Amino acid sequence: MIKIAILGSTGSIGTQTLDVVERNEDLQVVGIAAGSNIVRLEEQIRRFHPRLAAVGDEKKAAELKSRVADTDCRVVGGMEGLLMLAAMPESDILVTAIVGMIGIRPTVEGIRAGKDIALANKETLVTAGHIIMPLAKEYGVRILPVDSEHSAIFQALCGEEPSRIHKLLITASGGPFRGKKREELTNIKVEDALKHPNWAMGQKITIDSATLVNKGLEVMEAKWLFHMDLEQIQVVVQPQSVIHSMVEFVDGGIIAQLGTPDMRLPIQYALYGGRRRFLPGGRLDFAKLGSITFEEPDMETFKGLPLAMEASRRGGSMPTVFNAANEKAVGMFLNRKIGFLDIYAIIEDAMKRHKVIENPDVDEITGIEQETYRWIEGRW
Ligand SMILES: NC(=O)C1=CN([C@@H]2O[C@H](COP(=O)(O)OP(=O)(O)OC[C@H]3O[C@@H](n4cnc5c(N)ncnc54)[C@H](OP(=O)(O)O)[C@@H]3O)[C@@H](O)[C@H]2O)C=CC1
Ligand SMILES: CC(=O)[C@@H](O)[C@H](O)COP(=O)(O)O
Ligand SMILES: [Mn+2]
């Protein structure tokens, strides 16, 4: 039996993880956590019988506690609950399906408790990869990628050493505004930015796909996961999202992973530590597929990617500033306080004023995150 704790069980990745669990008799959920959606948490408690439910919002935690008083599930609120869930003695693997940098502390806690990490929460690796990767090595735990591109690379590697890799080819859909020029993006509506051409995902990552910030975050995520230099990572637009990413090896051979846009495959692959199991549903039909096409990313219009590469090159605390500014800006865009292109302006401004701190620790990272939020609030 593989015992699973899920940080972010009510979201897009979290609910698909539960779907995978329900289809496999040797998977068991022992803990779940969310921010405030206690209605869905209650449903999940009654269906999956976890031992622990953590709720970020303390008031909602108290409410959930009384709602599930007739069950065996313990409810704990705030960061204390998230950390408790990450380290719970009953679990083997922690799925980080939470959104944003709030995932850093629970991920560190999970590693210290010896849990393998099925990592969807890319923001943690982007901002704290220099802490997470050595810590995982020290504690002998695996960081198993859930993000579709990184899972594709993990699958394509077939156990080869990183030294046998020439480069990684990360595919991008190009988002809903692929082909548009900057002038056409001025009056973009939130509803249009939330229409991803191929994937159904949470709101934040869907906006990140539209700005190409998601691809920038994924380049940084790949750098840490596969021990690559930035120069060894190329982004290729593959508008149909059929090829999920590719690895070019030192002998010129390229291995690609293909499939339908369905996150249950990468989730299941991670939960089983890189072993294949039956998965019903979506199968590619090449006869109906038509063509698989490729394009260069438009770095002039979609500045999320070049800004991320710059943040990564400058290193230290700069990826934290890039990510924190983006998290804040996306929230403001979703609340209709700023326009689509302001997301780039906010990230650019925040990066310009920041003096890089080398090797920031977790407290420094969260300090810089809060300081970046405050600075944006005072200016926008
Ligand atoms: N969706 C996808 O297909 C993919 C997602 N990812 C990555 O996975 C992560 C999750 O994405 P996604 O599932 O789309 O996001 P969602 O917005 O759908 O879900 C986010 C989850 O995080 C929880 N959460 C938010 N804030 C807090 C908090 N303060 N404390 C505790 N829990 C919190 C939410 O709880 P509540 O519901 O209560 O708000 C929810 O369970 C992101 O990092 C994303 O980039 C990567 C690849 C693909
Ligand atoms: C499903 C997944 O992994 C997302 O990160 C997805 O890849 C987003 O697609 P684009 O960022 O390429 O639009
Ligand atoms: Mn992805």
Image (tube, rainbow, N blue to C red):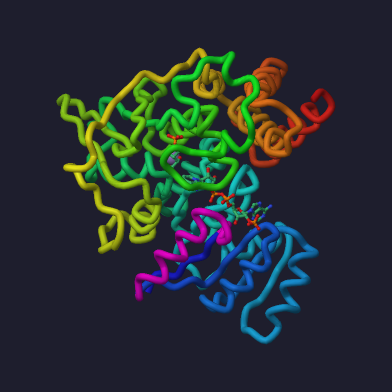
Measuring 38% from the left and 60% from the top, which residue is drawn there?
271
Look at the image and say whether residue 12 sits in the magenta stretch. Answer: yes
Percent of width and height locating residue 3? 44, 70
On the question of residue 356 being in view, the answer is no
Q: Residue at x 58, y 75 (%)?
A: 45
User: Quadrant location of the N terminus?
Assistant: bottom left
Residue at 34 percent of width and 23 percent of height: 232
Residue 275 figure quarter: bottom left
Q: Is residue 86 depicted above or below 128 in this figure?
A: below
Is residue 103 shown above or below 130?
below
Q: Which residues are the magenta region?
A: 7-25
Query: What secondary structure is the magenta-colored segment mainly?
Result: helix
Residue 359 spot, x, y in % from top left: 59, 30
Compared to 380, does 136 lie above or below? Answer: below
Q: Quadrant of residue 193?
A: top right
Q: Position of residue 336 (x, y in %)?
A: 73, 34
**Quarter of the image with the C terminus in it:** top right
